[in-house]
Image (spheres, rainbow, N blue to C red):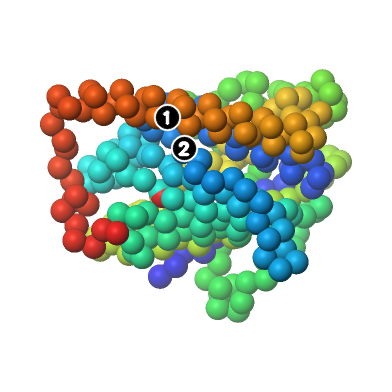
Amino acid sequence: MVLIKEFRIPLPLTVEEYKVAQLFMVATISKKNTSLGEGIEVLENKPFADGATTGFFTRKIFHLGGRLPAWLRSFAPTSLQIEEKAWNAYPYCKTSYACPLLGDRFSVSIETRYEPDSGTQENCLNLNNEELSIREVEHIDIVNDPIDEAHYKPEEDPKIFQSVKTGRGKLQNDWMKSTKPIMCCYKVCKVEFRCWGVQNKVENFIQRVALRDTFLMGHRQIFCWIDQWFDMDMESLREFERKTNEEMKAQFHNNNSNNNNNNNTQPQRSSFFSRSTDGNK
């Protein structure tokens, strides 16, 4: 059974500002998370056109390894990879995730639309009646929702941060009622993982940690990094993306080469998936 959640994430930005903010955040976090042969490898980043719809297509490989939780690492290989494909036709975006090792037993899709409201639309992404009957709606509040203490940084706390360039910040508990501008990211996430014994645990982990917690942290950063991206136009942003992707590619391959040399003297850990006969992020 597919697990469907719709996350609604209000932000004190305009829809046009978010277009730059999102791309800056993704490139910055991707670079920070690429180390020790793990992280994100960008394979494609190019314009696409589908009839009247135009935008950018990206294809990435997420090398997870030690980033998995302990209970999942107990039976997953250290070289687990997830492939991401994204079609960004702003203000709409569709993203899909697949794991070559699991084939059609694993899938995640995210449809996103950005609107100039506070999350009040009841069916922004036009789900059908069957999908609506099993959809769960969850609001994410970048100011009041708790985060893991291990990830907390005062400079990324919207209650503390105040932008020098825009004056926005030090958001109050009731910020959504009084803050202008305001917009909302509507994200419909569909998760399916067909593996007997761990299906529900994995699906809920993906929705709760891999998606919800990531959305919360990422959007706190989007706002608190506003002074870094606010003056960027799309041309300078694309150049920033290009340089970041080149640096990530070099860093990943250098680290991966070093890890391969080290692994020559280390025994490989056995795993459930390494014995799977149905293997194809």
Q: Are marks 1 and 2 in contact (CB under 8 Å)?
A: yes
User: Which quarter of the figure has residue 187?
Assistant: bottom right
Measured Cα–Cα span from mark 1 to mark 2: 8 Å
Q: Secondary structure at mark 1?
A: helix
Q: Is residue 108 visible?
A: yes
Q: Residue at x 40, y 70 (%)?
A: 1
- Circle 2 crowding by C-alpha within 10 Å: few under 14, some 14–19, many from 20: many
* Residue 161: % across, % down: 72, 23
Task: Tell me which numbered mark, 1 or 2, is placed earlier along the sequence.
Answer: 2
Q: Is residue 106 above or below residue 179?
A: below
Q: Nearer the viewer, residue 113 or 171?
A: 113
- Residue 276 is tagged as none
- Residue 252 is tagged as 1
Q: Residue at x 44, y 44 (%)?
A: 61
Q: Residue at x 67, y 71 (%)?
A: 126
* Residue 64: % across, % down: 37, 39
Q: Which residue is mark 2?
A: 40
Q: Is residue 50 above or below residue 13?
A: below
Labels 1, 2: front one: 1
In the rendered structure, the answer to whether residue 200 lies left or right of residue 244 reads left
The amino acid type of the residue labelled 2 equals Ile
